[in-house]
Image (spheres, rainbow, N blue to C red):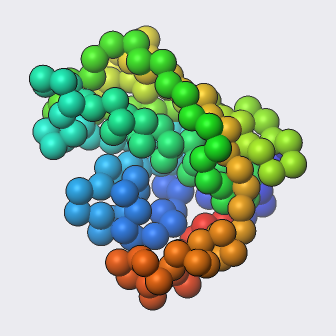
Amino acid sequence: MSRHPKATPPGQPIRFHHALCYGCGDDAVNGLHVTVTAGEGLGSTATMNVASWMEGGPGVIHGGILSAAFDEVMGTTALLIGVPVVTGHLEIDFAQPIPIESSLRFTATILGKQRRKVYTSSAAYIDGPDGAGEAKPVATSQALFIGIDPRQHFSEHVANSQRPDEHQRWAKYSSP
């Protein structure tokens, strides 16, 4: 398994796949606005601010929001090997509550690929004001993604999109 020759260079943000994506889209009003940055090899880092609307238990992030963030980080990281993916299985270990109004830093790695299956792992850390954060992850995740041809996979659903015209643009951003 190797990095795709057209993959985003290390240190650069990995392009979002469409503007209304709940996870990474710039135009998603109540989206997560996760920013994933290509790392060396088959890894990435990502950041996300935990806004007050993400509250689940009193003063802490909702577990489903964190799940969506992990899904976005690891699914985007798969683009480093040139494979657009959808989630097949996602599991999370929650280690401690994550306060709202905090900033999260993620690391993600592609562990392997077998035919259409892409295996990944990720960890989330609370970032401190100086950029240094928790040494131990506040949550970890493992996932299995399935490689797809986005145009074929989503063809029946494009008409339901808020912006069906975005589909052509999205297809270009789906793989390097």
Q: Can you tell which quarter of the image residue 55 is in?
A: top left
- Say whether residue 146 is left or right of residue 27: right
* Vertical order, 172 against 16 (above or below): below
- Given residues 53 and 73, the one toward you in this image is 53
* Vertical order, 2 against 105 (above or below): below
Picture quarter with the C terminus: bottom right
* Vertical order, 85 against 138 (above or below): below
User: How many numbered discs, if any?
Assistant: 0
Residue 1 percent across, percent down from the top left: 85, 43
Q: Residue at x 71, y 62 (%)?
A: 148
Q: Residue at x 69, y 75 (%)?
A: 152
Residue 69 percent across, percent down from the top left: 41, 41
- Say whether residue 96 is left or right of residue 144: left
Residue 166 appears in the picture as rendered: no
- Say whether residue 120 is left or right of residue 49: right
Q: Residue at x 46, y 70 (%)?
A: 18
Residue 58 appears in the picture as rendered: yes
Residue 2 percent across, percent down from the top left: 82, 46
Residue 30 percent across, percent down from the top left: 23, 56
Q: Residue at x 66, y 59 (%)?
A: 84
Residue projecting furthest to the bottom: 165
- Given residues 30 and 132, the one toward you in this image is 30
